[in-house]
Amino acid sequence: MLILGLDPGSLHTGFGLVDRRGSAVTLVEAGRISSPRALALPARLAHLVASLGELLARHLPDLAALETPFHGLNARSLIVLAQARGALLAVLAGRGIEIAEYSPAEVKSAVTGNGRADKIQVARMVKLLLGPQAGTPMSPDATDALALALCCAQRWRLDQLRDRQR
């Protein structure tokens, strides 16, 4: 099962694609989509949509994972983040890709065992969990996206069982 983790942003959106086979998870691709800062927000969102489309053309994931929005940002930042997130969700839904959402604490807990872990701890555990293939330096956006994909790989079956019981 191919799982795409996305860490949305209007300037930089991290992505991490992992392949889960049984209990083994391997890194397929990771990086970030960067939009030129000089572009107006609508043009940056269009660039984000086009770049995600190119990524999906290379790898068609079975599932995508995003973080649920959190309210620690100022109102303007939150609105811009929500617009970038909405653009990503629209592209994924338009391709028929199932979407899972997790809170930041759920992601941190799944990857590190501590829902209050800092970014350095999360990055260290992502590298440990993915082994030598994740040894190359990555942007924090890519690491966060991989943490989302790993959380989804770990929790997806349980989430499916829980949803069936409702």
Image: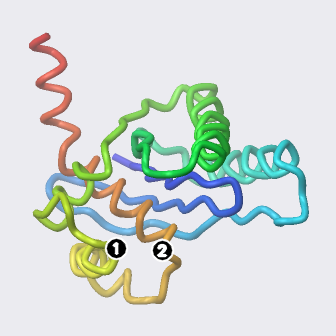
Residue 11 pos. (x, y %):
70, 61
On screen, residue 95 above or below 52? above
Q: Secondary structure at mark 1?
A: helix
Question: Quarter holding the C terminus?
Answer: top left
**Left or right side of 84 for 27:** left
**Left or right side of 20 for 61:** right
Q: Which mark is residue 108?
A: none
Q: Which mark is residue 140?
A: 2
Q: Nearer the viewer, mark 2 or mark 1?
A: 1
Please name the amino acid that badge 1 sits on. Answer: Lys
First in sequence: mark 2 vs mark 1: 1
- Mark 1 surroundings within 10 Å by alpha-carbon count, few (fewer than 14), some (14 through 19), many (20 or more): few
Q: Quadrant of residue 25?
A: bottom left
The residues tagged by marks 2 and 1 sit, at their Cα atoms, a distance apart of: 8 Å
Residue 49 pos. (x, y %):
73, 44
Q: Residue at x 60, y 46 (%)?
A: 81
> Marks 1 and 2: in contact by CB < 8 Å?
yes
Q: Secondary structure at mark 2?
A: helix
Question: Mark 1 = which residue?
Answer: 119
**Left or right side of 121 for 84:** right
